Every structure is written in structure tokens, then in C-alpha cells.
Amino acid sequence: MSNLIFKGQQNNYPTTSDFGEERSFWPYYGKKHEGIDMRGNKKTQVFCEINGVIKERYDQKNSYGKKLLIKTNLGYLTKELEGCILYQLYGHLFKYDTKVKLGKFIEAGSLLGLMGNSGNCYTKDPNTGIYVPVTEKQQNNENFNEGVHLHLSFMTELKNKKLLEYIKEKLNLKNELLFLDQWGYYYWLNPKYVYDFLNLFN
Ligand SMILES: [Zn+2]
């Protein structure tokens, strides 16, 4: 089993969908991709990128599937960012590692689970050539490798103005590298630049 870790521009997964890409298929027409999709084989190990606490761990059907939402207070980087929250979202897992429990603190580099195709993952229908959702039965089949990928997003709440300004200023970023969700609650950040930002404090 290969151990692949995403580190922004050092990403060694084949990317199947980039941040901000507009979706051209149902039910996502015109919606921007709020993270990055990386292909791997089913059961490839997925590791935690940044220290944080597990806030959500459940199967979000018709969406991210088996997902994890991890919350980090960036005050550990610098006092200035105390209270600024960054979330990591991992989607479409096959299964969670047994140590991954709701409310638990998890360290960067720890095993989170195994890559899968739970939730809304698509595969090409061999008869029509059209992309169709992977069914639950296929998702539970250990050997069904179609549509397997890791979805990774980083986001921050809108109220974290300080963090957004900080990221833009320090990285000289323009708005297209982050965008607001349709409910106006979260800012999604381009995963590529999250690491440039964190590396400022190394
Ligand atoms: Zn995705």
C-alpha cells in the first residue's frame, strides 16, 4: 500500500479536479470545485495534514461520503492568529482509522483512514460512456476501484477577516485564490497556497 501525502505544490497524487474548476455535470452545473481531487487506489492511506480536532466524522450521502472535518486554531502558529480557525475537509473515504474519533485531537502525519469512493463519486458507464454515480453497493465492494479519489478542502469562516487579510497580505494573493461559498458562510482556500501560508511560520 502506498503512502501518499499531499503537500500543496509537492502533491504527488494525480489531480483529477483542481480548485475552482467549474462543474459541467449534474447536479453541480456551474458550481466551482471547492477543493482538490486526487486519484489513488482504493485503500491508499490518507494522513492528516495539519494538527487539529475532529469536528465531524460521518457518512454524508450524495456529497462528500465518509468525511472528516478537522478544526485548527491557528494561534499555534503566531499569537496574532489566536482565534483564527482553519478547517480541513477530507471526503469520499472508504473507512476511518479506528483511532479517528469525534472530538479527538489528531496530529499532522497521523493516519486518518483509507481512500475510497463513498458519497458522490462518478464512474464511466461502459455501455454509454456517460459518467454515472458510483452506487453504494459498488462503494462497499473492496475491489471496485472506479471513481476512487480523495477530496481535500481548506476553509475558514467569513468572520475570520483577520486570517483572510493575513493570508492575502503575506502571500500577495488575489481573491481568485479563495472564494465564498453559496451560503456566504465559508471561504474556501486553494489548498496549494495553504502550505505557502503555513510555511511562513516554519
Ligand atoms: Zn472534490
Image (cartoon, rainbow, N blue to C red):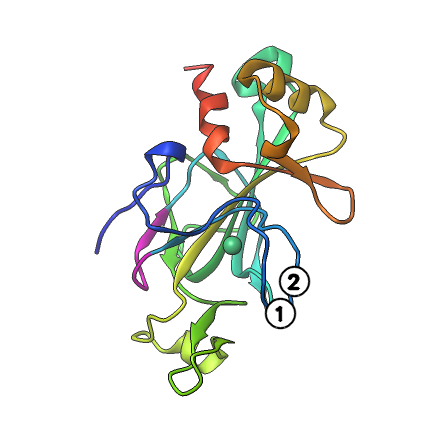
Q: Nearer the viewer, residue 65 or 184?
A: 184
Which residue is pictured at 78% across the width and 48% down the height? 183
Q: Nearer the viewer, residue 29 or 84?
A: 29
The N terminus: image quadrant? bottom left
- Any magenta on residue 143? no
The answer to whether the residue labelled 2 contacts the one labelled 1, judged by CB atoms less than 8 Å apart, is yes
Q: Is residue 6 left or right of residue 118?
A: left
Q: Is residue 20 visible?
A: yes
Q: Measuring from the top left, give residue 167's x and y in whole percent.
A: 59, 21
Q: Is residue 88 above or below residue 126?
A: above
| Tag shown at residue 29 | 2
Q: Is residue 89 above or below residue 177?
A: below
Q: Main secondary structure of the magenta part?
A: loop
Judged from the image, the secondary structure of the residue bearing numbered disc 1 is loop
In the image, what residue type sits under mark 1? Trp
Q: Nearer the viewer, residue 118 or 10?
A: 10
Cβ of disc 2 within 8 Å of ligand 1?
A: no
Outermost residue toward the left? 1
Magenta-highlighted residues: 40-46
Q: Measuring from the top left, give residue 109's x and y in whole percent.
A: 35, 37
Judged from the image, the secondary structure of the residue bearing numbered disc 2 is loop
